[in-house]
Image (cartoon, coloured by chain):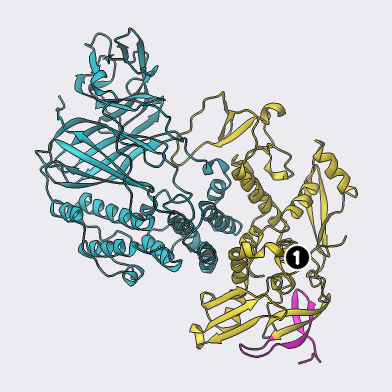
Chain colours: A yellow, B cyan
């Protein structure tokens, strides 16, 4: 499958240094495999995924695998991925199926009132209420901090929840936001490898040549934060200063960007400009600081080998490095060019 | 109305700069929490020097909402950035599922229902009756009858015959032991022969035998009714409430007066809270009062160019805090020089130690003009030597923004009052309850009312301005 985020230029595609990843997910009564390769997520146990999606859209049964693949696509340009997702390899997200279940058990998610594809947004899967009634129930949290709940309709006791019967309703923006965020958490629960790959997908969408590049100016604050949240800790650790002293802005232009520093020691202030695409091609691959260099661009890529540009120190021009991934780490290869 | 007064982004401010500031602040907050040992990040210890993750999230939300109030960003941006931080912390097990559940609860974004259109009436009643047999009450005090388009409420209080050991609060209560829950509920009739029943809409007792209750009349008396007779217990003499002489006449009430800038109002609200705390805490010691939250807000407003004229308010706060020996965060001192205190605050401080307030009850019934989609009605006061409590009903009160319920700077309303003898008072919202339609609250006034006060001008200031009403203080005593 071709990927629309691939830049037209000769530089390697953003996923070139991200090896395939695979994980098992609960799908109905089975454990199925989700496989990520070359920028795309595939449900291995659903060879006719497209057909299943069409059937589901027409009201057929849904399954978790297809829902997750579809959700992956829906979040492919969602900047909230970068707001919630990992900032570095050391930043371990602990969210997993247990936490998702915990949220479901709280009964705070409305059932999708439209053709939602989100598998986890279902109303208490173990409820015994008839499905048609369930579809009209709005869960309310039993305990609210300040608001006294009024129940004007029939009141049905639930374990920890109460339900108010309501008529059919069209979801508003708050409902869509909540549903979207819940879907994102479910994707992040797939694990670290998928978190980085989803983050890279989003960054690529907003980078030069990406599907949302034309809208980047309107989302500049989120892009600044996404870059700063990842560049600042890396640059600070590299230079022995504090992340709060690292100023980061998105770089626009054909060159790699800019890196300057003033002061010394732990009060050293650093100014960095890197393109948003750096997140996809460099950071997501775990290359941010490698072999004592701040890696600023990938020039050639054939996993597990990479040729990159790295800045040895602020103010210096970048040099070319040859790297190889082994055992989860990048190492500089002998004979690399300077 | 000044642009940006809590009603949306101010076109004169740089929203991109403000949103970027807020998002980078969220990044810094996430880094701060992740640098804490996991136990410190979640341990809710008041003595801890570092904010826990949960407290940091609340603080961030307060700053976000302050930027929105000031018009620097939209409310949606403020919510989104806060929610994303909450989700990021949850995904790292730094805040609990309940915080995340609140974030995912879409109905919290709902706007409160606007006050229903139509006349609002607040009629003084002002009488103390013996509690009826079987009512559980030694006495019952009837303060005021409030008739609104969607509800009619009689504000009452009293003494329980057999106080419970624990405080009890209930809405449409089924708590055993609270009056007016049994079959023998109060009734009423009007001059047209219509009959009314009354039930406890909400009630509470404090464990010392003091009981308060909002009695709801059903049906709602229709406009044109000249009087109501209320019978509180079978066989007791009815109490006539004259509606005709308190009709909604006299022309339109004055609308809201322009308020200070949102930033100025936020700072002044904190000053009012501090002022009130200095009047009501033992030995006037408020050295514990924490101004770091408003300091964060001021820092944010200054960083995005939205502090403006609020520097004067910061100066007033710095002076007040210095006078009360409260620690002043450097961020406050850095943006403003100490400024002179308003005459009202000076007056309040001068009268802080007075204990000469009249002891009594007053109907204190008045309808305030609608203010930015919220309607307040005053309906009863009890005064003592040290201060007074004013009962207020409200329609269309917005829910506090996410994670900001306990924060002074995020309070929507600021209350002041001045009695006819020239004594100023500041009030804070005490106990109360709210739904998406209605709210009830007790306003705790301090310092004491002047012993000879016969009326009180009450002013509430909110995001869109301020409104006032004057209530007569026709005291009557408990039995």
Residue placed under numbered mark 1 in the picture = A210
Residue A312 is one of the magenta-drawn residues: yes
Position above or below: B186 against B286? above
Image quadrant in which the C terminus of chain A is located: bottom right
> Residue B8's spot in the image, x, y percent?
48, 52
Residue B388 is one of the magenta-drawn residues: no
> Residue A126's spot in the image, x, y percent?
69, 35
Is A209 situated left or right of B30 in this image? right
Position above or below: B288 against A120? below
Whether residue A245 is visible, yes or no, is yes
Whether residue B413 is visible, yes or no, is no
Q: Quadrant of residue A200?
A: bottom right
Q: Nearer the viewer, residue B148 or A164?
A: B148
- Give, as a single range, the part of the protein colored magenta: A311-338
> Residue B85's spot in the image, x, y percent?
55, 58
**Residue drawn at (17%, 55%) of the image:** B349
């Amino acid at each position: 499958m071709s990927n629309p985020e691939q830049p037209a230029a000769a530089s390697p595609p953003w996923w070139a240094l991200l090896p395939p990843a695979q994980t098992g997910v609960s799908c109905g009564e089975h454990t199925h495999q989700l496989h990520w390769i070359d920028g795309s997520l595939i449900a291995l146990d659903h060879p006719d995924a497209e057909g299943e999606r069409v059937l589901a859209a027409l009201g057929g049964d849904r399954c978790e695998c297809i829902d997750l693949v579809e959700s992956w696509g829906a979040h492919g340009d969602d900047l909230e991925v970068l707001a919630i997702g990992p900032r570095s390899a050391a930043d371990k997200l602990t969210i997993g199926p247990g936490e998702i279940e915990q949220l479901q058990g709280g009964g705070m998610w409305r059932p999708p009132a439209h053709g939602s594809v989100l598998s986890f947004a279902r109303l208490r899967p173990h409820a015994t209420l008839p499905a048609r009634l369930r579809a009209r129930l709005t869960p309310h949290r039993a305990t609210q901090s300040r608001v006294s709940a009024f129940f004007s309709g029939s009141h049905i006791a639930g374990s920890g929840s109460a339900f108010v019967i309501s008529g059919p309703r069209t979801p508003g923006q708050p409902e869509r936001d909540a549903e979207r965020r819940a879907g994102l958490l479910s994707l992040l629960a797939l694990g670290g490898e998928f978190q980085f790959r989803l983050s890279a997908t989003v960054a690529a969408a907003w980078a030069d040549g990406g599907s949302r590049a034309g809208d980047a100016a309107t989302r500049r604050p989120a892009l600044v934060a996404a870059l700063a949240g990842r560049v600042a800790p890396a640059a600070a650790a590299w230079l022995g200063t504090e992340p709060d002293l690292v100023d980061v802005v998105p770089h626009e232009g054909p060159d790699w960007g800019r890196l300057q520093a003033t002061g010394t020691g732990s009060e050293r202030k650093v100014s960095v400009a890197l393109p948003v695409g750096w997140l996809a091609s460099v950071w997501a691959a775990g290359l941010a600081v490698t072999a004592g260099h701040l890696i600023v661009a990938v020039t050639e890529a054939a996993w597990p080998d990479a040729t990159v540009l790295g800045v040895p120190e602020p103010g210096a021009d970048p040099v070319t490095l040859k790297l190889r991934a082994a055992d989860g780490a990048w190492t500089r290869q002998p004979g690399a060019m300077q | 109305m000044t642009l940006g007064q809590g009603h949306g982004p101010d076109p004169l401010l740089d929203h991109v700069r403000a949103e970027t500031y807020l998002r980078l602040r969220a990044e810094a907050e996430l880094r701060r929490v992740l640098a804490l040992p996991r136990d410190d990040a979640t341990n809710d210890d008041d003595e801890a020097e570092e904010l826990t993750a949960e407290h940091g999230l609340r603080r961030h939300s307060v700053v976000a909402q302050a930027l929105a109030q000031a018009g620097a960003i939209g409310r949606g941006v403020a919510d989104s950035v806060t929610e994303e931080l909450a989700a990021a912390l949850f995904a790292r097990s730094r805040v609990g599922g309940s915080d995340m559940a609140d974030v995912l609860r879409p109905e919290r974004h709902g706007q409160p229902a606007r006050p229903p259109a139509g006349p609002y009436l607040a009629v003084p009643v002002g009488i103390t009756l013996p509690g009826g047999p079987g009512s559980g009450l030694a006495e019952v005090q009837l303060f005021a009858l409030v008739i609104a388009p969607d509800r009619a409420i009689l504000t009452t209080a009293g003494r329980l015959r057999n106080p419970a050991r624990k405080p009890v609060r209930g809405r449409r209560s089924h708590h055993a032991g609270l009056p007016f829950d049994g079959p023998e509920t109060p009734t009423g009739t009007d001059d047209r022969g219509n009959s009314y029943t009354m039930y406890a809409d909400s009630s509470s007792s404090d464990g010392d035998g003091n009981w308060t209750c909002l009695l709801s009349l059903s049906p709602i008396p229709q406009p044109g009714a000249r009087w109501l007779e209320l019978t509180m217990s079978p066989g007791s003499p009815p109490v006539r409430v004259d509606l005709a002489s308190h009709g909604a006449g006299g022309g339109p009430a004055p609308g809201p007066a322009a308020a200070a800038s949102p930033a100025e109002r936020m700072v002044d609200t904190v000053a009012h809270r501090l002022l009130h705390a200095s009047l009501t805490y033992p030995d006037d010691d408020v050295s514990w009062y924490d101004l770091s939250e408003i300091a964060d807000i001021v820092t944010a407003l200054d960083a995005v160019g939205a502090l403006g004229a609020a520097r004067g308010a910061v100066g007033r706060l710095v002076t007040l805090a210095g006078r009360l020996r409260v620690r002043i965060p450097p961020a406050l001192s850095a943006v403003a020089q100490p400024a002179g205190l308003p005459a009202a605050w000076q007056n309040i401080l001068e009268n802080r130690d007075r204990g000469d307030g009249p002891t009594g009850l007053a109907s204190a019934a008045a309808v305030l003009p609608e203010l930015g989609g919220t309607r307040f009605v005053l309906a009863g006061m009890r005064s003592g030597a040290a201060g007074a409590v004013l009962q207020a009903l409200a329609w269309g009160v917005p829910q506090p923004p996410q994670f900001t319920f306990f924060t002074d700077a995020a309070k929507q309303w600021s209350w002041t009052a001045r009695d006819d003898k020239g004594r100023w008072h500041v009030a804070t919202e005490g106990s109360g309850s709210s739904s998406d339609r209605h709210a009830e609250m007790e306003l705790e006034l301090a310092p004491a009312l002047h012993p000879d006060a016969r009326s009180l001008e009450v002013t509430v200031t909110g995001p869109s301005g301020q409104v006032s009403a004057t209530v007569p203080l026709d005291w009557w005593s408990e039995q």
